[in-house]
Structure formats: C-alpha cells, structure tokens
Amino acid sequence: MTRFIAIKTEESTAVLTMNTPENRHNPEFLAEFNQHLDQIEADKNIKSVVLTSNSEKNWSLGIDLEWMANTSNTPETIAGFMSDVTALLKRIITFPMPIIAALNGHTFGNGAVLACACDFRLMKSDKGFFCFPEVDVMVPFLPSMFPIINKAIPQAFFNRLAMSGMRVGAQELLDNKVVEAIFADEAQLQAGALGFAQQFNKNRWIYAQNKTQMNKQIVLTMETEDPIFIDNISKLLWKNLQQK
Ligand SMILES: C/C=C/C(=O)SCCNC(=O)CCNC(=O)[C@H](O)C(C)(C)COP(=O)(O)OP(=O)(O)OC[C@H]1O[C@@H](n2cnc3c(N)ncnc32)[C@H](O)[C@@H]1OP(=O)(O)O
C-alpha cells in the first residue's frame, strides 16, 4: 500500500518518497508512515533512511487542516490524531538508524517539525521555502515540538521564524546550520542525499541507544506534558474549526 508514501531500497538505504501533492499529515498518512518504518525495521540490511517527496513544489505542508475540519470529527478524534503525530515523531527520534530529510520543496508547519525530528536535513536551493506558519494558522505547537525543533534549529533563529511566520530558503537554513548541505537542483539533492545516507552503516543497537539517550528529554515531555496539552487544545481546535 503506497497511496501516501512510496518505499524503495537503494543498497543499504530505504528511500521513503511522500507522493501526494502537499504531503499533508492525516491519520492515513501516519498509518502508512508507520507501516513503512515497520518494514524497514524488519529488513536487517537497511542501515539508513532518506525521506523525500515526489511533488513538484512541496516536501510537506504539515497537518491536513481540511481533514481536521471534517464535520464528522470530534474533539476526541482530533486528540487521538495529535497523539498519533507525537507517537510518530517519537518513533523517528528513537529509530535505530539515521533518517535524512531531503527537502525538495516547501516545508511548512508540522512538515517542518517532521524535518526537525529527522537526524539530518539537506535541501535544494532553487525553490522551496521552510516556514513555521503556526502564528498565522492559529495551530499551536505541542510542548514536545519545541525541543524537537531545538535539536535542529538554533534558538534565536527559531525564535525569529516562530514569532514572524517568515519563509526562508535553503541558503539561510545553511547559514544557520539547520541543513547540512544545499544542492542546486532536484537531481543533485537526491544523489547527494543518497550518498550522505550511505555513509551511515553502523549497528542499529548503538544508534538506538544513542538516539534514545540524546532525545530522552523530548520523550519525557511527550509523556508528561503533551497528553494534558492535547486534551485541552483539541477541544478548542475543534470548536474553531467547526465555526469556520
Ligand atoms: C503544529 C503544526 C501545524 C501545522 O502543520 S498547520 C499547517 C501549516 N501549513 C501551511 O500553512 C501551508 C499553507 N500553504 C501555503 O502557505 C502555500 O501553499 C505555500 C506557501 C506552501 C505555497 O504557495 P504557492 O503560492 O503555491 O508558492 P509557490 O508558487 O511555490 O512559490 C511562490 C513564489 O515564490 C518563489 N519561490 C519558491 N521558493 C523560493 C525560494 N526558496 N526563494 C525564492 N523564491 C522562491 C516561486 O518561484 C514563486 O514565484 P513566482 O510567483 O514568481 O512564480
């Protein structure tokens, strides 16, 4: 099943290609992402993962607000979905191998959080903005999203992005050490991401140990703060979305 995300293997690297126009996050997207991670964990030959998109414009535009506003949703459905978002992010930050985000288009909202959860980011520089539009779309970050973002983005730069909702391109991300490298176009990015990923061929156990330790404060925040926040915010979000 590859409606939302395709999977292929290039030597020891699994390439996950998000394949809808905006790569929005909804329950089906999350379920398929988890199935692919199960498949990768089951294949002992895989040592690294590249996460990219086949959309001409977008890497991922974040939460599927259209799905969220569906009238059949209840506050409980929204809360369940947000918990599932957290669970996927937790899986990524503790996954037993490096995950490399190959950003080949606009990366917005929870798409940007997903990119930050990955271990490394590479981006193409011809087109594509990176942006946290939460201040404009009135969807707050979950508590654990701040430390996820902070592991990828220096605090002062994130502060500027989050307060303004401004869009930045690849060069500014490179200048602020958010991405490891930038590439002139799509072909160079994809080749670069694969080459970058294939340098990682260590034992899964040690990656799991180190990632779990390195990110344990994030996991603690997910377990202690996110559930209460999600419970409160899902009621508010549901009310706002139903009134639109
Ligand atoms: C906690 C979590 C919360 C959430 O997840 S909430 C959901 C958050 N998601 C969103 O809010 C996403 C909403 N979507 C959008 O805002 C728009 O959907 C986009 C901005 C992503 C795309 O808009 P478009 O108008 O389709 O953009 P373009 O046509 O791709 O680009 C506009 C112009 O900008 C140029 N451009 C693109 N990338 C760059 C760059 N890196 N540097 C300089 N210019 C760039 C293009 O070429 C074009 O220009 P030219 O209008 O002249 O054709």
Image: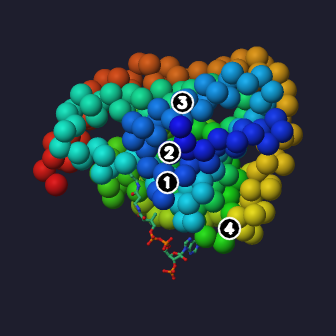
Residue 39 image-quadrant placement: top right
State which tag comes first along the sequence, 2 or 4. 2
State which tag comes first along the sequence, 2 or 1. 2
Q: Nearer the viewer, residue 160 or 114?
A: 114
**Circles 2 and 1: CB atoms closer than 8 Å:** yes
Disc 2 from disc 4: Cα separation:
28 Å
Asked if residue 28 is positioned above or below residue 180 in the image, the reply reads: above
Q: Which mark is residue 34?
A: 3
Q: Residues within 10 Å of mark 4 (few under 14, many from 20)?
A: many
Q: Residue at x 40, y 46 (%)?
A: 63
Q: Which residue is mark 2?
A: 3
State which tag comes first along the sequence, 1 or 3. 1
Q: Of the residues tagged 2 and 3, which is closer to the observer?
A: 2
Q: Give the x, y percent position of residue 111.
A: 50, 49
Q: Which mark is residue 125?
A: 4
Q: Indicate yes or no: mark 4 CB to ligand 1 under 8 Å.
A: yes
- Please name the amino acid that badge 2 sits on: Arg
Disc 1 from disc 3: Cα separation:
17 Å
